[in-house]
Amino acid sequence: MKKLLGQDASGTYAFNPTAKTVTFSGLSQQVTLANILLITNVTANTIIYNFASSTTGAVSFVNNVLTLDYDTTSMNATDALQIYIDVESYEESLATLLRRMNKLLESNAVVDSRLRQKVVIEAIGTNLAAPTEVNATVPVSGTVNASCTGTVTANVSNAVSIQNVASSAANPYTLASSTTGLIMEGPVHQLWRVANDAQSCYASAIRSKLSFS
């Protein structure tokens, strides 16, 4: 891409008209003779190098020093030069940059129709130097809500011992054994259900048939 030295492309030059040389410095990229397109002495309004001309070409280009074919001995070292070089551009448009960012955010793993990604946990823990390897047992602390199918084995610490509560699916007047712990909340005591049944029976069977005069 054609760029103007010192404006579009970083770098400076030193002009030696007596030696007919232009020395480049501070270039951000490596430049060869093929990268130099045009050099114009804007003070003298004269083209002193043109890559496509046989009369204003170059004798050599070594160590960033361009030796010119053109006779510049009548010019001054302080003359301003306009230098165009062909260097690779690393600039990206906003649209290209956004597309690249969006591509980076896309999942590289298999996802389902709801865009949920399936992951495999190899190790867990806050100690990055020695994480806990996941095999058959995963240590969990705190409150856990889970919906599982199949066979699940869990070791629960600080669990509440077995309590006698009535099963909501069974007769409320018969106590059944259920295990409650930190991972679930037991149902309301069934004595309240018995009291509620008694109140309903009184209201429908006795109170509704009372008449007052």
Image (cartoon, grey):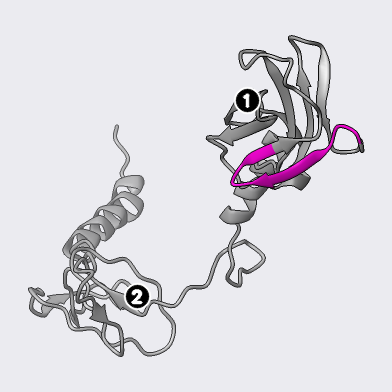
Which residue appears at 83% of the width and 17% of the height? 46
Is 60 magenta? The answer is yes
Is label 1 in contact with label 2 (beta carbons under 8 Å)? no
Q: Is residue 173 left or right of residue 201?
A: left
Question: Label 1 neighbourhood size at 10 Å, few (<14), some (14-19), many (20+)?
Answer: some
- Residue under the image location 40 percent in, 72 percent down: 147
When the figure is inspected, residue 170 is found, relative to residue 20, above or below; the finding is: below
Image location of residue 194, percent across then percent down = 22, 63
Q: Amino acid at mark 2?
A: Ala
Categorize mark 2 by other alpha carbons within 10 Å: few (<14), some (14-19), many (20+): few
Label 1 secondary element: strand
Residue situated in front as seen by the camera: 89 or 53: 53
Where is residue 25, by image quadrant? top right
Nearer to us in this view, 129 or 30: 30
Q: Is residue 134 above or below residue 100?
A: below
194 horizontally vs 95: left or right: left
Q: Which residue is mark 1?
A: 16
Question: In the rendered view of the protein, which quadrant contains the C terminus?
Answer: top left
Residue 70 located left or right of residue 178: right
Give the camera-side residue of 4 and 183: 4
In this picture, is 46 found above or below 50? above
Quadrant housing residue 66 = top right
Residue located beneath label 2 in the image? 169
Q: Which stretch appears magenta?
A: 55-66
Residue 88, which numbered label? none
Q: Secondary structure at mark 2?
A: loop
Q: Amino acid at mark 1?
A: Asn
Residue 72 visible to an observer of this rendering: yes
- Sequence-first disc among 1 and 2: 1
